[in-house]
Amino acid sequence: MDTLMVLLGAAGITFLIGVPGADDVMLNYQSLAFHDILTLRSLLGLKPAPEFAAWLERMGLYDSAGQRMRALAPGQTRLASLAGAA
């Protein structure tokens, strides 16, 4: 996880963009992955935006009771669970 991202999160930033796989080693550029944002949210005790949390619940990816992403069964992927919810 990027140190700047943690500092911004602690300062109250409300929006981060995660684009996994968009790293460029030659330009020394590293993008945020989705798990970085999940980790930051967990670290700082933050919740996703209400409309995003509602979408995550509808897709079966978010547990509103525990306020966290649902655990996957062995061998299950997030993509497979999204395809089943659609």
Image (cartoon, rainbow, N blue to C red):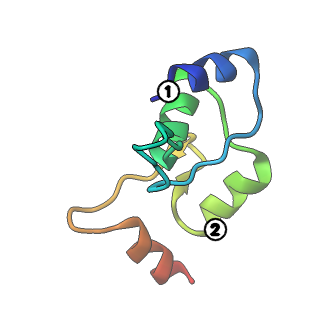
Q: Is residue 86 left or right of residue 78?
A: right
Q: In the depicted view, which residue is nearer to us: 39 or 46?
A: 39
Q: What residue sits 49% from the left and 41% below the top?
A: 27
Q: Position of residue 60 (x, y in %)?
A: 53, 65
* Residue at which label 2 appears: 58
Q: In the depicted view, which residue is nearer to us: 18 or 63?
A: 18
Tell me the number on the disc at residue 2: 1
Q: Earlier in the sequence, mark 2 or mark 1?
A: 1
Q: What residue sits 49% from the left and 27% below the top?
A: 2
Q: Is residue 80 left or right of residue 57?
A: left
Q: What residue sits 77% from the left and 48% below the top?
A: 50
How packed mark 1 is, by other alpha carbons closer than 10 Å (few <14, some 14-19, many 20 or more), is few
Q: Position of residue 49 (x, y in %)?
A: 75, 45
Tell me the number on the disc at residue 22: none
The quarter of the image holding the C terminus is bottom right
Q: Position of residue 57 (x, y in %)?
A: 61, 60
Is residue 33 something one can see in this rendering? yes
The residue type indicated by label 1 comes to Asp
- Measured Cα–Cα span from mark 2 to mark 1: 30 Å
Q: In the depicted view, which residue is nearer to us: 29 or 85?
A: 29
The quarter of the image holding the N terminus is top left
Q: Is residue 86 above or below residue 68?
A: below
